[in-house]
Image: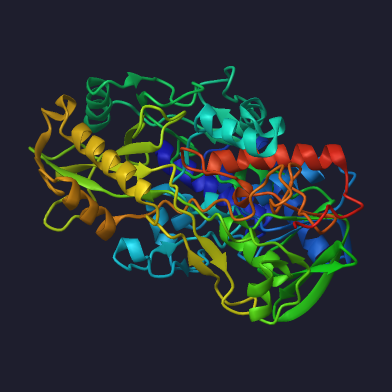
Amino acid sequence: MHDLNQGDAINRLIDAAYAGRLDRRDFIKALAAAGVTAAAAHDMAEHAAQAQSVQSAQLASLKSEYDYIVVGAGSAGCVMANRLSQDGRSTVLLIEGGGTNIEQEKIADPRIYVRNFGTDTDWGYKSTPQQHLNNRVIVAPVGKIIGGGSSINATVWLKGDKADYDTWETAAGPGWGYDAIIRNFKKAERYAGGETAIRGGAGMIATRKPALGHPVTQAFIASAVGLGKREQIDINDTASVGDAAGQQDINVDLNMRRISAAHGYLLPALSRNNLTLLANATVTKLDIAGGQCRGVVATIGGETRRFAAAKEVIVCGGGLQSPKLLMLSGIGPADHLRQHGIEVVVDQPRVGANLHDHLLVRLVFSTKQALPPPVDTGHAGITYHKSNASLAGPDIQIFGRLNAPNVPGLKPDEGYLTMPGLLKPKSRGTVRLTSADPAAAPLVDPNYFADPADVDAYVTSVEFAMAIGNGKGFDGLRKDQVSIPGAKRAEIIGYIRANAATYFHFVGTCAMGKEATAPVDEALRVRGVARLRVADASVMPTITCCNTNAPTLSLAERAAEIVLASGPVAEALPSPR
């Protein structure tokens, strides 16, 4: 069996066995047929069988109370469930609205991740018409599966810039500065290149660098260097990335299989008797009484059940769903809650506010001849840029792509892309309820481009991306610039308004902070309600200058440290005034 096909088969078998869709005997036989040694197959089968047995037993006799309840098995929720159950002393219930079938092809193969959008593995949210993007409705994918966004994203693994975490430290204290984040980034990462001062070599998520030999990758990096960038062989092994150019990492194994938070954190923990995964169950409300969160109310197969939390409830729903659940439970802007007939528990205007995200456009260039086939996930390098030299860190990110898929009149192998992203938008939007019905989608309004400063920064981004695509590194490949050749400012702005789309990096809607008006404090405790925390991308006060999955995992690792060190909160923090 070819090595790639062998790895593909083995990974599918592992996922199926952990999910209980393959019994022990058939699992061992299938592993042997795939070339796995008898001893290794036995060990793998033992662990998978134990996990499946434990979870089946626990689901058959669900308790009414657990020490910790984690809401959402996305990136952050998988981390929290693993770490809170690790010492075996606390019982943990992890509730996920989606399913467990991560062996299906559209999830396992990161090259086809977009096939998840608008399907059963995506909550299917959309934005309101965006006034400054030609009133377009922008899709807002949110993973509806264990692993959450890490199960349906493009598997880009970047840690960001020191300036990102300097900003977090200003907002929420030294526990959220660069040193704390890097320590936890290393916990999360198992980099194929080994451990360094700021890279992890023994963590939970396997990461590696895609091949550098493709001519488009070489041309991209050479063009960026020709425009004044510094070639950085390992883009994640530097504190500041503002002038770096190189190849980004991916959390994909050598067999081109995604390594999501579910694979890295959740599956290995499912054999623990103190961890219960309750999938296909939706938490509809937090059970709050007497200033404390006492548990959650969930819908399971059409039935409503209440689960109590002896210690804490930790909400890990992400940038769109965490504020939705808080508001459904009476924590949010009082007037908005009353509008939907929801009793106000805490008047918190900033729950659901501060929504921001990354925007991306594609610039297409045709080639003189057909290109070699794409390798790995198709990424062809990355560079960072500052739209203003006075900025502490970069506000622009530009990716290359090895081909040009879905371009009318152009075969995919007859073109390449440069893709500029706006990393530090000043525009802020909101997440709001459309009704008190938990099943109703939230009203998502990122308010893209509302601040004119974002337009200026993004024009600079597109101009630099065009310069890279037209740079000397591409002279041997490039035929023409297909997208807006020779464009001036007005045409660039028009192109952005007509084509920009989300990276689906929604953050900030339950932002942490030292000030009393922040929805959650430095320890991620919800102000005004005891025994309740939020730990996911929604607590980021500002977005990172990179794709947010790795920073979210690092944040969740830090959150787990805080929870385990502090214990439950007995009294409510003061409500905002």
Image quadrant where residue 532 sits? bottom right
Q: Position of residue 260 (x, y in %)?
A: 56, 46
Is residue 536 depicted above or below 166 in this figure? below
Quadrant, the C terminus: bottom right
**Residue at image x 61%, y 52%?**
538
Q: Position of residue 362 (x, y in %)?
A: 26, 48
Q: Position of residue 109 (x, y in %)?
A: 43, 49
Q: Is residue 333 visible?
A: yes
**Residue at image x 11%, y 28%?**
475
Question: Viewed as shown, does residue 80 lie left or right of 239?
Answer: right
Toward the front, the furthest residue is 577
Is residue 201 depicted above or below 122 in this figure? above
Count of numbered circles in the view? 0
Question: Viewed as shown, does residue 165 lie left or right of 524?
Answer: left
**Residue at image x 84%, y 55%?**
531
**Residue at image x 45%, y 56%?**
105
Q: Position of residue 88 (x, y in %)?
A: 87, 43
Q: Nearer the viewer, residue 313 or 200?
A: 313
